[in-house]
Every structure is written in structure tokens, then in C-alpha cells.
Image (cartoon, rainbow, N blue to C red):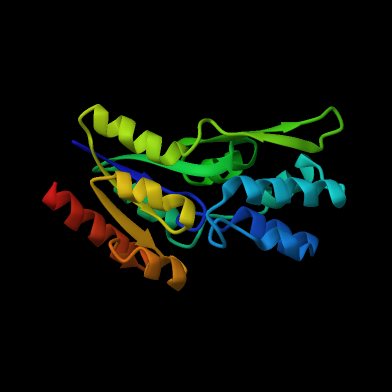
Amino acid sequence: MHIVCLDLEGVLIPEIWIEVAERTGIAALQRTTRDGPDYDNLMQGRLAILAQHKLRLADIQAVIAGMAPMAGARAFLDSLRTSRQVVILSDTFYEFAAPMMAQLGWPTLFCHRLEADAQGFVRAYHLRMPDQKRAAVEAFRALNFKVIAAGDSFNDTSMLAAADAGIFFRPPPEIAARFPQFPVTQDYAALAAALDAAAAKL
């Protein structure tokens, strides 16, 4: 028995912070985990930008409500779930993810939480646990599951390395070059084929 662990943003849905940056015109919010491996540095910078521009959690949620999954993502996920157990491991937040999960058919999601004050301003973020993607994969393996993982960013590489098989999906070229051990796929058909090939070897 095996489990497929997928990243969310960049694999099934567009990058939320890039959408927020484009809708608000705040270019500094375009930085994502594709731009560097230090997640805390990234999030502290985002919180400071939100405070500077007086953006509330509701403002970000309004942007997300107008988003849709990537083209073909729902069909890919539906097909995958007919034959495999699938868990989404993401560094997004439950306060962001609900509209996307509804459009994807409510797959299982492990992610983090945000803390907002009484006025609705985001004041802090709380990790479910450090390096939770890797930890989840290791926990599944400890339960005697084989794990195949797919992601696109720096923050996915520990998950891919911890899995029995790791696959990149549309990674930036510089990330793919730094981690050549992971095969690169560029569309859902290729990702499905790579998952099948990996499963056949487990």
C-alpha cells in the first residue's frame, strides 16, 4: 500500500501570494518558497508587508475566493484518488485553503494556521510543526506505507527526499538543477505517468 503526498500551491492551485500581489499591486508579496528556502524569513516579511499596507485576513480571503485550481488539476486529482490514497501537504494556512479545497473535492490537507487580532489583521503564523511535510512523510513510512511525493519548490525538497520516490512538478529551472535526483514533470499526464512508474518499483 502506498500514499501519494502532493504539494498544493504550484501543483494543484496557483500561488496564493502571487495572486494577492497582482490583485493589490504590492509587488513585494510575489516572493514565494520558489525564491528561497527560509520559510520563516519569507513569512515574517509577508506579515510586515500586510501590516504596512493595512491588509486584513478578509482582504486576502476575498482574493482567494476569486481563484480557481490550475487547469486540469481537479480531473488529475479525481483520477488519482480512485486508485491511491492522497494527502496534500502544504505550507499554506487553513484560513486560506477552504475555497480551493471545495473546488478540489475536499482532499485531505495538512497545513498551518494564522492568528488574526480583533480587527482582522494577521499578527502571527503558527506552524503545525517544523518541516511538517518531511515529518508527515516519515510518519507515513513508519506506519509501513510506501510514499511517493511531488512538489515544485525549495520547501518540498525535504519531503521529496524523505519519500520512497520524489518527483518535481514544474519546478523553476534553478531548483531542478540543484536537486537533479528528482525527475521533472511539466504536465499532469507526465506526473501521472511518473507516479505510476514510481509505484511499479515500490
Q: How many marks?
A: 0
- On the question of residue 90 being in view, the answer is yes
Q: Give the answer, above or below, for where 129 lies relative to 46.
A: above
Q: Position of residue 176 (x, y in %)?
A: 39, 67
Judge by depth and name the residue closer to the eye, 134 or 200: 134
Q: Residue furthest left?
A: 201
Quadrant containing the N terminus is top left
Q: Give the answer, above or below, for where 33 lies relative to 180.
A: above
Q: Position of residue 186 (x, y in %)?
A: 37, 69
Please name the residue shown 52% across and 54% down the image.
37
Q: Is residue 58 left or right of residue 166?
A: right
Q: Give the answer, above or below, for where 131 lies relative to 65.
A: above
Judge by depth and name the residue closer to the eye, 151 or 11: 151
Please name the residue shown 77% across and 41% down the image.
58
- On the question of residue 107 being in view, the answer is no
Q: Position of residue 155 (x, y in %)?
A: 48, 51
Please name the residue shown 22% across and 34% down the image.
145
Q: Is residue 27 left or right of residue 79?
A: right
Please name the residue shown 25% across and 27% down the image.
143
Q: Position of residue 164 (x, y in %)?
A: 23, 46
